């Protein structure tokens, strides 16, 4: 799915979680979708350095329960989804997830390691998300 197609599709989804490793375009898509659809963005990466990783993903998982229309993006979103699933057994997630697979730009060794961590968590939670009939869009 191209970026233009993805942005057009997101207009029909009032609550969106962008998941992907570093340099996959999460922030760009969030900003463009926000501008196009008029939805606020919650920037999970803004918590990095402010909170420990576990605390940041726990806070982001709480954002997923907030009412209204929104977009949540950042490297911590995949771990936040895992925490949300654990905290809400059997409950469907009232949001659309956009999985952004491949990096769009060259990544550093640290970013490559972070991407591997995101992929590991994503593959672990994907079956549960599918079982709960979560809408998942992919841009690989």
Image: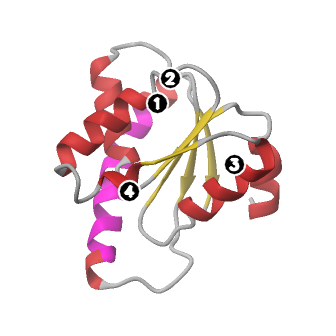
Check if mark 4's residue and mark 2's residue have beta carbons within 8 Å. Answer: no
SS at mark 2?
Answer: loop
Return the residue at label 4: 45
Residue in front for this viewpoint, 110 or 72: 72
SS at mark 3?
Answer: helix
Q: How many marks?
A: 4
Return the residue at label 2: 93
Marks 1 and 2 sit apart, C-alpha to C-alpha, by: 8 Å
Is 127 situated left or right of 11 in this image?
left
Picture coordinates of residue 8 (x, y %)? 83, 49
Disc nearest the viewer among 1 and 2: 2
Marks 3 and 4 sit apart, C-alpha to C-alpha, by: 17 Å
Crowding around mark 2 (Cα neighbors within 10 Å: few <14, some 14 to 19, many 20+) is some
User: First in sequence: mark 1 or mark 3?
Assistant: 3
Which residue occupies 20% across, 50% down?
53
Quadrant showing the N terminus: bottom right
Which residue occupies 34% across, 27% down?
84
Quadrant showing the C terminus: bottom right
Check if mark 1's residue and mark 4's residue have beta carbons within 8 Å. Answer: no
Splitting the image into 4 quarters, where does residue 9 fall? top right
Splitting the image into 4 quarters, where does residue 46 fall? bottom left
- Determine if the magenta segment contains residue 19: no
Marks 4 and 2 sit apart, C-alpha to C-alpha, by: 21 Å
Is 28 situated left or right of 128 in this image?
right
User: First in sequence: mark 2 or mark 3?
Assistant: 3
Return the residue at label 3: 34
Return the residue at label 1: 129
Splitting the image into 4 quarters, where does residue 127 fall? top left
Figure coloring: secondary structure
Q: Which residues are magenta?
A: 111-127
SS at mark 1?
Answer: helix
């Amino acid at each position: 799915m191209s970026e233009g197609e993805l942005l057009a599709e997101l207009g029909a989804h009032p609550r969106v979680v962008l998941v992907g490793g570093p340099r996959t375009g999460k922030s760009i898509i969030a900003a463009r979708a926000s501008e196009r659809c008029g939805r606020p963005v919650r920037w999970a990466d803004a918590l990095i350095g402010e909170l420990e990783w576990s605390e940041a993903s726990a806070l982001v998982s709480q954002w997923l329960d907030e009412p209204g229309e929104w977009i949540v993006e950042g490297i911590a979103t995949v771990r936040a989804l895992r925490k949300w699933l654990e905290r809400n057994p059997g409950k469907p997630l009232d949001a659309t997830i956009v999985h952004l697979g491949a990096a769009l730009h060259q990544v550093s060794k640290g970013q490559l390691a972070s991407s591997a961590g995101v992929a590991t968590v994503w593959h672990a939670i994907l079956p549960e998300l599918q079982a709960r009939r979560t809408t998942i869009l992919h841009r690989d």
